[in-house]
Amino acid sequence: MDAQPTLIRVVFVLLPGSLVLDWAGPAEALRIANQRLRASGAAPRFAIEFASPRPDTVGSVGIALTGLAPLPDLPTADGAAWVVLVGMPGDTIPIDTPETQDLLHWLRGLRLEAGRLELLTICAGSLLAAHAGALAGRRATTHHHHLDELRAVEPRCEVVGNRVFVLDPPVYSSAGVTTGIDLLLHRIADTCGEALAAQVAQTMVVALRRGPHDPELSPFLAYRNHLHAALHRVQDAVSERPQADWNVPRMAEVAHTSARHLTRLFVEHAGVAPLAYLRRLRLAAAQLALASGASVTRAAELSGFGSDTQLRRAWHQFGLPGSPSDAGGLARG
C-alpha cells in the first residue's frame, strides 16, 4: 500500500499591523486545496499555522488576532515546512520594534533547504527576509513601492521589479497583496499538480493565474507613478477609450495645455512619450481582444490600430513573444 504523503507545515508569521489580505488569501487557497483533496478521497497536504512573537496582535484593518502560536522550531524530523512572511502598511518597514527584533532573531536561526524548509515572502515580507540575511545572493521581488528599499537593505540580492513572483528555491517571493495568491497557487501546483491548482483557482474565482514571468503592473496601471493631476486626467481618458482617434493635440485638450507642453509632461512625469503610451495601451487592448477569441483584424480594429500591420509592428516594438496570430490561435485553442 502506498504511503500517504506527509503534511507540509505552512507557518504564516504575523507581526502587529500585518496586511490581512497578504495572509488571508493565500491561507484560503491552501484550505481549499485541502478541501478538494478530501473530496477526491485523498489526504490533505497542508497544515496551516499562524505564529507570532506574541500570542495576541492586531491586523492591518484593526482585527484582533489572538491565540497565535509561538515561533516554532523548524524544520522538524517528520516533514517539510514553509515559512510565510507578509507585509505591513507604511512607506518603509521598521525593524526596531521588540516583535520584529524577535522575528529577525528567529529567522536568522533557520536553515533553509529546498524541499525541506522553504521561505515564501508576500509584499514587504521580503524586507523582513532581507534584514535577516536570507536574501543575500538570491533573486527576489517585493511590492513596487519597496523595490529601492529592498536594494538598499540587501545589496547582494538581485531585486527583480515588475514581476508577480520570483522563484529562487528555497526562497519564493511575490510582489504582494493578490500576488500572494498567485504564488500559493504555483506552489500548490508544484506540490499537488496543475489540476488541483486549477480547481482552487476556479473556486476562488481567480480569472487568470499569473506566473513568474508575468508583469506585476498592468499596462493600464503603468506610467502612473506620479502626482501630476492634468497628466492623470489624460491617462484616464486614454485608458477608458484607447480605440478613440487620439493624437497629441487631442490629448493636450484634455489636459488644457499645449501639445508641446503635454509631451514634456509625459516625458518628465511618466517617463514615456504620449504616443508611445497610447500604443502600449492599444496593444494591451488588442491582447485582451485576442485572448477573447477575436481575429487579428478585429483585435486591431477594437484597439484603435489602423491595420493589422500597425498591430504587428507595435507587437514587435514592445518585445512581445510570437505574433498576434499566435496569440489568437492560443486563445481559440
Image (spheres, rainbow, N blue to C red):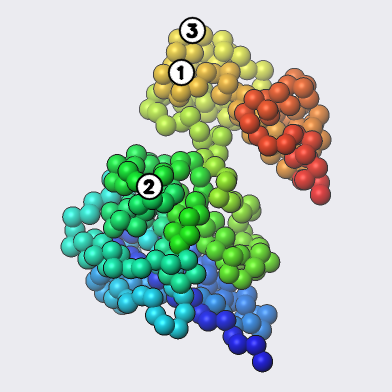
Mark 3 Cα shell of 10 Å, populated few (<14), some (14-19), many (≥20): few
* Secondary structure type for disc 3: helix
Q: Where residue 316 appears, x then y in whole percent?
A: 68, 28
* Secondary structure type for disc 2: loop
Give 127 or 228, whichever is nearer the viewer.
127
Q: How far apart are labels 3 and 2 at the CA level?
A: 41 Å
| Image disc number at residue 260 | 3
Mark 3 or 1: the one toward you: 1
Residue 68 seen anywhere in this rendered image of the structure: no
Mark 3 or 2: the one toward you: 2
Chain-order first, disc 3 or disc 2: 2
Instruction: Kindly identify which residue carries mark 1.
Output: 267
Q: How far apart are labels 1 and 2 at the CA level?
A: 30 Å
Chain-order first, disc 1 or disc 2: 2
Q: Quadrant of residue 100?
A: bottom left
Residue at 28 percent of width and 64 percent of height:
108
Instruction: Kindly identify which residue carries mark 2.
Output: 157
Position of residue 280 relative to residue 163, above or below, is: above
Mark 2 Cα shell of 10 Å, populated few (<14), some (14-19), many (≥20): many
Chain-order first, disc 3 or disc 1: 3
Residue type, label 2: Cys
Residue type, label 1: Val
